[in-house]
Image (cartoon, rainbow, N blue to C red):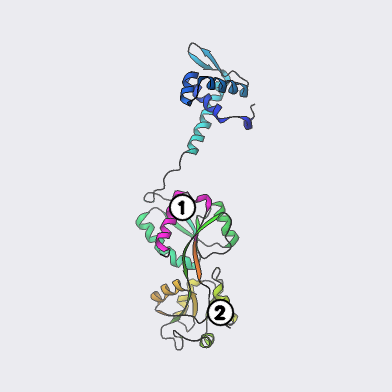
Amino acid sequence: MPDLRALDLNLLVLFQYLVEERNLSAVARRLGITQPAASNALRRLRATFDDVLFVRTPQGMLPTPYAQHLAGAVAEALGMLAHALEAPPRFDPATSTRRFRVAMTDVGEIHFMPGLMERCAREAPGVRVESVRLQGPELQRELDAGQVDMALGAFQGLGGGLLQRMLFRQGYATLFRHGHPTAHEGMGLKAFRAERHLVVSHAAPYGQVNQALERAGLVLASHFSVPHFAAVPYIVSVTDLLATVPSKLADSAAERFGLRVLTPPVRVPALQSNLYWHARFQRDGGNQWLRALIVDSYAQR
């Protein structure tokens, strides 16, 4: 049995052409090589398989029984390889039914998903976007494996093999209900600390706001808390609690829930939202299309 490690793929191409042409000169022309080069390749092919493979006859170069045995498998293998090496089919959003999995936080879902759904309905009616909740090493593994197409938002702990594109930076704002007895824009730190607050306890990757509140003197354990941002506007709209949240969420919630907004009298680092994807899918047509759509819809100009 020939050693596959020593097998020259070009010899298999010559074998396939000889099966089809049964003429070494015709094979040489088809390969774009000289007759002597084709003869030399045939000698190497015979040595590799320890068989004469093709015998010259008045009807042309006919395959030996062993060559006939090889012919079907060689043709199939070369065909599969040629198919694999073809350029992938062009991604057409208008006809695609692809389902993209995009990692987002609850804040990301509130900000990104409505616009993505609207754009897909208009431009790619068969495409679906599925939001998944993953963080840190688990998200990295899923991106590495291609199980998640991209991540969208302010994520921490992502590294090797990933590419990213900044979308926007935002600060924080404090929400309170219309008619709140004491909260107002411009209130000082002492008055701000005296209020009752609603804290988002599982705020990663937005935990910097809780750290800033603690540095300002708030004892978070003494305040009410929820694990996610999604419930915040519902609670704030019917209580006297204050909630400090990313500014884009504050703007959206204030309009929909009739809330007021003030600038918190604490220093919180700006929050940067990025688009992340794995380098392996840099040239994937569908991934490129969705990235372009996201950048067009949400990137700061």
Q: Residue at x 57, y 21 (%)?
A: 40
Which residue type carries mark 1? Asn
Residue displayed at 56% across by 52% down: 145
Look at the picture and state if 241 lies above or below 7: below
Instruction: Tell me, for residue 213, which label it has, or none.
Output: 2
| Quadrant of the image occupied by residue 111 | bottom left
Foreground pick, 64 / 235: 64
Residue receiving disc 1: 287
Percent x, y of residue 94: 36, 51
Which residue is rendered at x = 37% and y = 61% of the image?
A: 118
What is the CA distance from the residue labelled 1 to the residue labelled 2? 39 Å
**In the drawing, does residue 72 fall left or right of residue 118?**
right
Count neighbours of disc 1 (C-alpha within 10 A) and say few if under 14, some if 14 to 19, many if 20 or more. some
Q: Residue furthest left?
A: 122
Which one is in front, 62 or 301? 301
Location of the N terminus by quadrant is: top right
Q: Amino acid at mark 2?
A: Leu
Q: Is residue 276 magenta?
A: yes
| Magenta segment boundaries in residue numbering | 275-300
Residue 298 lies in the magenta-colored region:
yes
